[in-house]
Image (tube, helix red, strand yellow):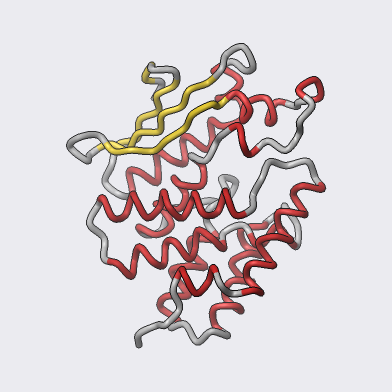
Amino acid sequence: MASLVTYKYIKQNPDIMEYIRRADKTLEAMGYTEHSFPHVERVAATAEMILKTLGYDERTVELAKIASIMHDIGNVINRIDHAQSGAVMAFRLLDNLSMPASEICSIIAAIGNHDEGTAQPLDAISAAMIIADKADVRRSRVRNTDLTTFDIHDRVNYAVVMSGVSFSEDKKTLILELQIDTEISSVMEYFEIFMNRMILCKRASAFLGLKFELIINGSKIL
C-alpha cells in the first residue's frame, strides 16, 4: 500500500509542528539546548545525505526524514523516556494519517531508539538518524547568553564553532569533523559528556557497513 504521507506534508501539518514547538519549550524551561526546527531539520538533512550516499531508495530516505523531524516530540511529556513516549505519539499521529503499518513501524522504531540511554540501531533509518542526531553539536544550539553561568553542556556546545558529517572518498568511512575553541572548552570536556554518543555513532555506522571517524581540530580522535 502506497503512502501519501511525505516529509513536506509533515512539515505543513499544524499539529505535528505544534508538538515540535511545545517539546522544545519544555526543554527550554529545563535549561536544555535548542531542540526545535533548526535541530530536527538538520537531523533530517544529515540522515538524508547519509542514506542517499549509500544508495538507499527514495522512500527509505523519505521515512528517515519524517522520523528525524518528529524524533524529539516526546519531550512535550517529559525528558525522561522521551524517545519511547515520542514513538507512541508518532504512532497515533501517523496512524491517523493512514500511513501503512510497515512504514509506521520503521519510523517509530527509529524514534524509540535514538536516545543514547536505550538506543539501538535496528535498520538503515534508525542508524542514519542516530548518527545525524548525535552529530548535531554547535554553538547556535546554546540558549544561555551569559557565558559566566555556563554549565558544561553550554560550554561544550558553545565551543563547537564548526561541525559537519561527510564521507571518505571511498565512501567506506563516515566522518564527524568538529572545530572546537579550546579557550572555551577542552577536547577532554567534549568527551566527558559526549563519549557515549560517539560510541553510539560508531555502532550505528557499523550497522550501515561503515567505519566511524571523529576529527577534532584537524586531529583524528576516533
Taking the image as shown, residue 141 lies to the left or right of residue 218, namely right
What residue lies at 45% left-to-right and 81% top-to-bottom?
101
182 shown above or below 55: above
Q: Position of residue 12 (x, y in %)?
A: 56, 72
Q: Position of residue 55 (x, y in %)?
A: 22, 57
Q: Position of residue 5 (x, y in %)?
A: 45, 78
What residue lies at 56% left-to-right and 32% top-to-bottom?
194
Taking the image as shown, residue 84 lies to the left or right of residue 66, namely right
Q: Nearer the viewer, residue 100 or 163?
A: 163
What residue lies at 34% left-to-right and 50% top-to-bottom?
49
Q: Position of residue 208 (x, y in %)?
A: 30, 49
What residue lies at 57% left-to-right and 14% top-to-bottom?
182
Extreme residue in the top direction: 183
190 shown above or below 182: below
Quadrant containing the C terminus is top left
Taking the image as shown, residue 183 lies to the left or right of residue 26, namely left
State which quadrant residue 4 falls in. bottom left
Taking the image as shown, residue 90 lies to the left or right of residue 54, namely right
Q: Nearer the viewer, residue 10 or 128?
A: 10
State which quadrant residue 37 falls in. bottom right
21 shown above or below 140: below
9 shown above or below 51: below
Extreme residue in the left direction: 170
Number of disc labels:
0
Quadrant containing the N terminus is bottom left
